Image (cartoon, rainbow, N blue to C red):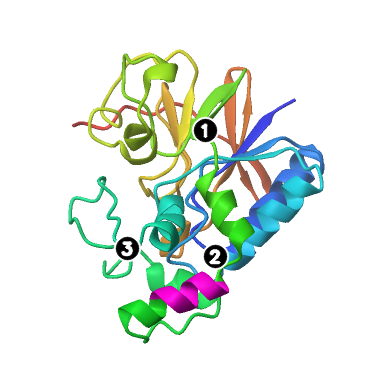
């Protein structure tokens, strides 16, 4: 049975459902589907995305959802309002950063984002369901499958999986994207938006930039083969040359 993986969703429920339909046509409705995280922010319906995935999992769908860096922002904001993600080079708060997507996420929950900070926080705490907060905060950091290791951002080369830090698993770029290291399993990740899913031999980036108007990538992984799923069926993804540092 193939393993199916979907890239960074970023609040695009319509694109997520379309990606699932491509998978269902290829592997049936009981296909094992892993999602690399970043469910929320930037797109118009973060609430809908979380609802949809929670509902599917509660109904017994074999769906796995790993935690992305963006998935940390909303629960941390509601539970620890002053928290700033240490992975942000700007050191700006989620609600103040110009491009992280907090306003879109909060509006999807019906929050008036023009409110002053304290009223905004109070309204967000009222509007966001407790089970959504708990769900996002408890997402696993990775999914190890016989065909691949699925993780949001990547791994620190040469470090055992059990010793990887959360910061690297949800934020890493430098040291991973430019590494030709054999990680053992194929590492399937998102986090770094590119034009479409791309296979680099030791890793597979499935963040095709759905947050920026491009399609949400869905791939099928089999022993020794990777395929991008399109509306016309499978397209083989052959390993490309590792990008330069």
Residue 200 seen anywhere in this rendered image of the structure: yes
Residue at image position (35%, 45%) is: 192
Q: Which of marks 1 and 2 is in front?
A: 2
* Disc 1 and disc 2 in contact, CB within 8 angstroms: no
Q: Which residue position is annotated with label 2?
A: 46
The quadrant holding residue 129 is: bottom right
3D distance between C-alphas at marks 1 and 2: 30 Å
Residue 28 as seen in the image, left or right of residue 124: right
The residue positioned 30% from the left and 32% from the top of the image is 177
Query: Could you tell me which secondary element the residue under label 3 belongs to?
Result: loop
**Residue placed under numbered mark 1 in the picture:** 237
Other residues around mark 3 within 10 Å, as few (<14) / some (14–19) / many (≥20): many
Question: Magenta includes 40?
Answer: no
- The span picked out in magenta is 121-127
Q: Name the residue under label 3.
A: 94
* Residue 67 position within the rendered picture, expressed as x and y whole percent measured from the top left: 49, 43
Q: Which residue is drawn at 18% across and 50% down?
A: 89
Determine whether 107 is above or below 29 in the image. below
């Amino acid at each position: 049975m193939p393993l199916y993986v979907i890239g960074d969703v970023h609040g695009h429920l319509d694109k997520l459902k379309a990606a699932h339909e491509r998978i269902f046509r290829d592997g049936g409705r009981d296909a094992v589907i892993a999602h690399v995280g970043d469910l929320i922010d930037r797109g118009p319906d973060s609430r809908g995305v979380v609802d949809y995935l929670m509902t599917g999992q509660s109904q017994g769908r074999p769906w796995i959802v790993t935690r992305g860096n963006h998935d940390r922002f909303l629960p941390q904001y509601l539970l620890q309002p002053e928290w700033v993600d240490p992975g942000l080079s700007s050191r700006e708060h989620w609600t103040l950063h110009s491009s992280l997507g907090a306003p879109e996420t909060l509006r999807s929950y019906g929050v008036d984002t023009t409110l002053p900070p304290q009223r905004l926080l109070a309204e967000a705490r009222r509007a966001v369901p407790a089970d959504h907060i708990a769900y996002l905060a408890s997402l696993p950091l990775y999914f190890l499958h016989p065909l691949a290791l699925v993780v949001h951002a990547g791994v620190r080369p040469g470090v055992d999986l059990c010793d990887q830090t959360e910061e690297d698993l949800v934020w890493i770029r430098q040291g991973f994207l430019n590494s030709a290291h054999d990680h053992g399993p194929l590492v399937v990740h998102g986090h770094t938006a590119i034009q479409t899913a791309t296979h680099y031999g030791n890793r597979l980036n499935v963040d095709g930039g759905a947050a920026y108007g491009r399609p949400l990538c869905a791939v099928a992984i089999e022993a020794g083969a990777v395929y991008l799923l399109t509306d016309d069926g499978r397209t083989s993804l052959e390993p490309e040359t590792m990008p330069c540092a």
